[in-house]
Image (spheres, rainbow, N blue to C red):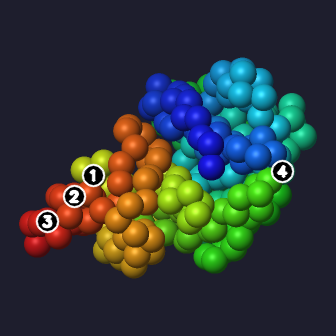
């Protein structure tokens, strides 16, 4: 799987283009803002956008989804329906974070644990990884050993759980029972900051790794 990371919004959120290298079919994961930069990257890479995928309902991950969906005639797919309340609260999120006004929206399709998505000749598997938000999803290309993990896991850190319906114990379970079993060699793209490898986090992450303070 080819990929391109475009940090958007003042939160430097990693909007990610996942592109089938054979067909150039592309998924836009978490277009949080700056739709013109995302469209420019699609053009530069000669990618054919087919869908917008959302990991969770936080504004910096979804802010440009409705505009891009309308401009490019794409379906919005995900997150899990347990994040509906976050999407409903987009106007308040915009106010809280000082973003331009944002209207609430619903995706064309919610996704469940274990769902499969076809992108050109590549297959994406959907993992439900609640904790940061209750409806948070992770998108995995097992053949490529690549996962887009949103705000579940970062290099040397984990997602915040101090938001409404955040759950720290649940987040640790999501990482330990859904992410780490994917394999040490799997590379992950987090919602913010640099890419990492699951094995390194399994060994050294101070919050969820083997050496964490209990
Ligand atoms: Zn978030
Ligand atoms: Zn985020």
Residue 182 position in % (x across, y down)? 45, 71
Observer able to see residue 50: yes
> Observer-nearest residue: 203 or 136?
203
Relative horizontal placement of residue 158, taking residue 163 as reference (left or right): left
Element carrying mark 1: strand
| Disc 4 + disc 3, Cβ < 8 Å | no
Task: Choose the circle earlier in sequence order: 1 or 4.
Answer: 4
> Observer-nearest residue: 170 or 52?
52
Task: Choose the circle earlier in sequence order: 4 or 2.
Answer: 4
Q: Which residue is mark 2?
A: 205
Task: Choose the circle earlier in sequence order: 2 or 3.
Answer: 2
Q: Residues within 10 Å of mark 1 (few under 14, many from 20)?
A: some
Q: Residues within 10 Å of mark 4 (few under 14, many from 20)?
A: some
Depicted 184 relative to depicted 106: above or below: below
Task: Choose the circle earlier in sequence order: 4 or 3.
Answer: 4
- Displayed quadrant of residue 15: top right
| Disc 1 + disc 2, Cβ < 8 Å | yes
Task: Choose the circle earlier in sequence order: 1 or 2.
Answer: 1
Element carrying mark 4: loop
Q: Which residue is mark 3?
A: 212
Residue 23 position in % (x across, y down)? 81, 45
| Disc 1 + disc 4, Cβ < 8 Å | no
**Marks 4 and 3, how far apart at CA:** 40 Å
Q: Residues within 10 Å of mark 2 (few under 14, many from 20)?
A: many
Depicted 106 relative to depicted 174: above or below: above
**Marks 4 and 2, how far apart at CA:** 36 Å
Frontmost of labels 1 and 2 is 2
Q: Which residue is mark 4?
A: 75
Q: Which residue is mark 1?
A: 157
> Observer-nearest residue: 90 or 181?
181
**Marks 1 and 4, how far apart at CA:** 32 Å
| Disc 2: residue Cβ within 8 A of ligand 2's nearest atom | no
């Amino acid at each position: 799987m080819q990929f391109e990371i475009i940090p958007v919004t003042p939160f430097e959120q990693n909007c990610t283009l996942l592109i089938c290298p054979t067909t150039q079919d592309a998924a836009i994961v978490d277009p949080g803002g700056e739709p013109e930069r995302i469209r420019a990257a699609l053009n530069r890479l000669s990618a054919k956008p087919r869908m917008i995928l959302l990991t969770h309902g936080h504004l910096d991950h979804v802010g440009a989804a409705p505009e891009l969906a309308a401009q490019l005639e794409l379906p919005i797919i995900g997150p899990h329906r347990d994040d509906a309340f976050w999407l409903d609260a987009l106007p308040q999120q915009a106010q809280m974070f000082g973003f331009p006004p944002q209207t609430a929206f619903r995706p064309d399709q919610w996704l469940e644990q274990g769902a499969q998505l076809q992108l050109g000749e590549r297959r994406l598997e959907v993992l439900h990884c609640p904790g940061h938000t209750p409806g948070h999803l992770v998108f995995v290309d097992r053949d490529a050993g690549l996962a887009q993990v949103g705000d579940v896991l970062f290099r040397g850190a984990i997602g915040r759980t101090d938001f409404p319906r955040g759950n720290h114990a649940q987040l640790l379970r999501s990482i330990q029972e859904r992410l780490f079993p994917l394999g040490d060699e799997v590379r992950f793209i987090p919602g913010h900051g640099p890419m990492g490898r699951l094995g390194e986090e399994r060994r050294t992450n101070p919050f969820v790794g083997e050496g964490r303070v209990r």
